[in-house]
Image (cartoon, rainbow, N blue to C red):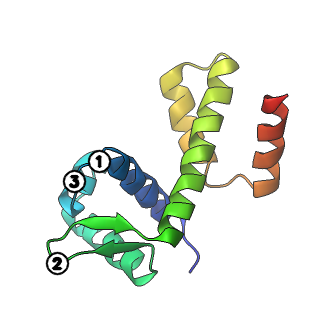
């Protein structure tokens, strides 16, 4: 299943919540992202159907292996692009906002080239 930008954003948020080490539910995703309950509920259903997340009987959300893989990829892009933009003189808030937009459209080839360049 191919994810669109919004799906990637949800997975990145779920990864962020997971890294906090505290179990969480859809309502926590709503609060983190500032989205409505119906929007998040629909997204969670799609992510569950696509086997990117699991939801237990109590409503707690976990990433599947496939979900974690996508989330980590998006998070890595966000982190690297934010860092690059900040080093170029962009203020941190704007850099984070722009990186969020860029992380979903940049090709793997271009991302790897940027990463390689920065590692030199």
- Whether the residues at callouts 2 and 1 have beta carbons within 8 Å, the answer is no
Residue 5 in sight: no
Measured from the top left, where is residue 56 in percent x and y? 23, 75
Residue at 46% over, 81% down: 50
**Residue, disc 1:** 21
Residue at 57% over, 37% down: 79
Q: Quadrant of residue 86?
A: top right
Image side of residue 107 versus residue 67, left or right: right
Task: Label 1, secondary structure: give it.
Answer: loop
Measured from the top left, where is residue 55 in percent x and y? 27, 74
Residue at 22% over, 68% down: 38
Figure check: 26 above or below 119: below
Q: Quadrant of residue 27?
A: bottom left
Front label number (3 vs 2): 2
Q: Residues within 10 Å of mark 2 (few under 14, many from 20)?
A: few
Q: Residues within 10 Å of mark 3 (few under 14, many from 20)?
A: some
- Whether the residues at callouts 3 and 2 have beta carbons within 8 Å, the answer is no
Residue at 64% over, 36% down: 80
Q: Earlier in the sequence, mark 1 or mark 3?
A: 1
Image side of residue 66 versus residue 43, left or right: right
**Residue, disc 3:** 28
């Amino acid at each position: 299943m191919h994810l669109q930008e919004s799906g990637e954003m949800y997975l990145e948020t779920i990864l962020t919540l997971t890294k906090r080490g505290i179990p969480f539910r859809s309502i926590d995703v709503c609060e983190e992202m500032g989205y409505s309950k119906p929007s998040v509920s629909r997204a969670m259903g799609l992510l569950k159907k696509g086997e990117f997340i699991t939801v237990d009987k109590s409503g707690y959300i976990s990433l599947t292996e496939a979900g974690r893989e996508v989330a980590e990829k998006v998070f890595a892009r966000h982190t690297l692009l934010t860092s690059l933009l900040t080093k170029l003189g962009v203020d941190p808030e704007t850099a984070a906002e722009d990186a969020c937009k860029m992380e979903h459209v940049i090709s793997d080839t271009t991302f790897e080239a940027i990463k390689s360049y920065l590692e030199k």
